[in-house]
Image (cartoon, grey):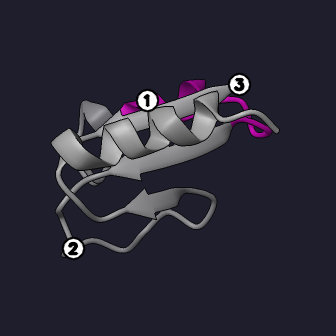
Amino acid sequence: DIFLVVGTSLAVYPAASLLQFVRRDAEKYIVTLDLNTEPHRDFIWLKERASTGVPKLVKQWSAPE
């Protein structure tokens, strides 16, 4: 349901190959400080350190709807 990438922009292999395994309807997130790459269109980018970005996502996901 959720695809989370931490610490890479998926611009190089082998990390870039992960994209072929993700369902189209999955929520997709990238947490990275790498600002030098073109963001993937269907990803939500958090341009921050993993130590702050990941806890924010966990809090968001665990909040009641």
| Rendered position, 1 above or below 35 | above
Marks 1/3: CA–CA distance:
15 Å
Number of the label disc, if any, that sits on residue 35? 2
Circles 1 and 3, Cβ within 8 Å, touching? The answer is no
Nearer the observer: mark 2 or 1; the answer is: 2
Q: Point out residue 7 in the picture as x, y percentages from the top left corner.
A: 20, 43
Residue at 40% x, 49% y: name it: 30
Q: Which residue is mark 1?
A: 18
Closest to the observer, 47 or 20: 47
Closest to the observer, 24 or 54: 54
Label 2: which secondary element: loop
Q: Is residue 38 left or right of residue 63?
A: left
Which quadrant holds the C terminus? top right
Quick one: label 1 or label 3, which is nearer the N terminus?
3
In reply to whether residue 64 is colored magenta, the answer given is no
Q: Residues within 10 Å of mark 3 (few under 14, many from 20)?
A: few
Q: Which residues are magenta?
A: 17-26
Nearer the observer: mark 1 or 3; the answer is: 3
Circles 2 and 1, Cβ within 8 Å, touching? The answer is no
Closest to the observer, 53 or 2: 53
| Rendered position, 65 above or below 36 | above
Q: Amino acid at mark 3?
A: Asp
Q: Amino acid at mark 1?
A: Leu
Q: Which residue is mark 3?
A: 1
Q: Point out residue 52 in the picture as x, y percentages from the top left corner.
A: 24, 47
Residue at 75% x, 33% y: name it: 64
Label 1: which secondary element: helix
